[in-house]
Image: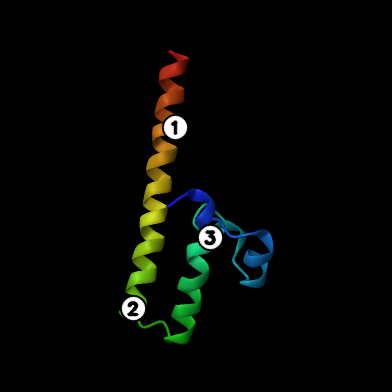
């Protein structure tokens, strides 16, 4: 999955009323997760797939940022 497909536009984020802290690389996956949660009355087992996809995106983004940080630190030496 490319990162561009996981980033919502500013208009989409504004329409979904995403808080600024959640407008990140996985924002396009958070919007359907939040919709599912509201429709299913926040029952944790109802939106497992959406949550898993969103959390995987968050994990992959974290690993990407840590790898970039490691590369930068090695370049400074």
* Residue 53 x %, y %: 37, 63
Question: What whole-number distance in Å separates the C-alpha atoms at marks 1 and 3?
Answer: 21 Å
Name the disc covering residue 68, or none: 1
Which quadrant: the C terminus? top left
Whether label 1 touches label 3, CB < 8 Å: no
**Upstream in sequence: badge 2 or badge 3:** 3
Residue 14 vertical placement versus 3 (above, below): below
Residue 6 vertical placement versus 15 (above, below): above
Crowding near the residue tagged with mark 2, few <14, some 14–19, many ≥20 C-alpha atoms within 10 Å: few
**Upstream in sequence: badge 1 or badge 2:** 2
Crowding near the residue tagged with mark 3, few <14, some 14–19, many ≥20 C-alpha atoms within 10 Å: many
Question: What whole-number distance in Å separates the C-alpha atoms at marks 1 and 2?
Answer: 34 Å
Q: Secondary structure at mark 1?
A: helix
Whether label 1 touches label 2, CB < 8 Å: no
Q: What residue is pinned by disc 3?
A: 27
Residue 10 vertical placement versus 15 (above, below): above
* Residue 36 x %, y %: 45, 79
Q: Secondary structure at mark 2?
A: loop
Q: Nearer the viewer, mark 1 or mark 2?
A: 1
Question: What whole-number distance in Å separates the C-alpha atoms at marks 2 and 3?
Answer: 20 Å
Identify the residue at image location x=63%, y=70%.
Answer: 17
Crowding near the residue tagged with mark 1, few <14, some 14–19, many ≥20 C-alpha atoms within 10 Å: few
Residue 26 vertical placement versus 13 (above, below): above
Query: Could you say which quadrant of the image residue 33 lies in?
Result: bottom left
Identify the residue at image location x=48%, y=82%.
Answer: 38
Name the disc covering residue 38, or none: none
Identify the residue at image location x=69%, y=64%.
Answer: 11
**Upstream in sequence: badge 1 or badge 3:** 3
* Residue 54 x %, y %: 41, 62
Query: Colour mode?
Result: rainbow
Name the disc covering residue 44, or none: 2
């Amino acid at each position: 999955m490319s990162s561009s497909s996981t980033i919502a536009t500013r208009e989409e984020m504004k329409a979904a009323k995403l808080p600024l802290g959640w407008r990140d690389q996985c924002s396009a996956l958070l919007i359907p997760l939040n919709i599912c949660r509201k429709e299913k009355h926040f029952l944790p087992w109802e939106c497992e797939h959406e949550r898993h996809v969103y959390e995987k995106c968050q994990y992959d983004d974290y690993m990407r940022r840590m790898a970039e940080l490691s590369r930068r630190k090695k370049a400074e030496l």
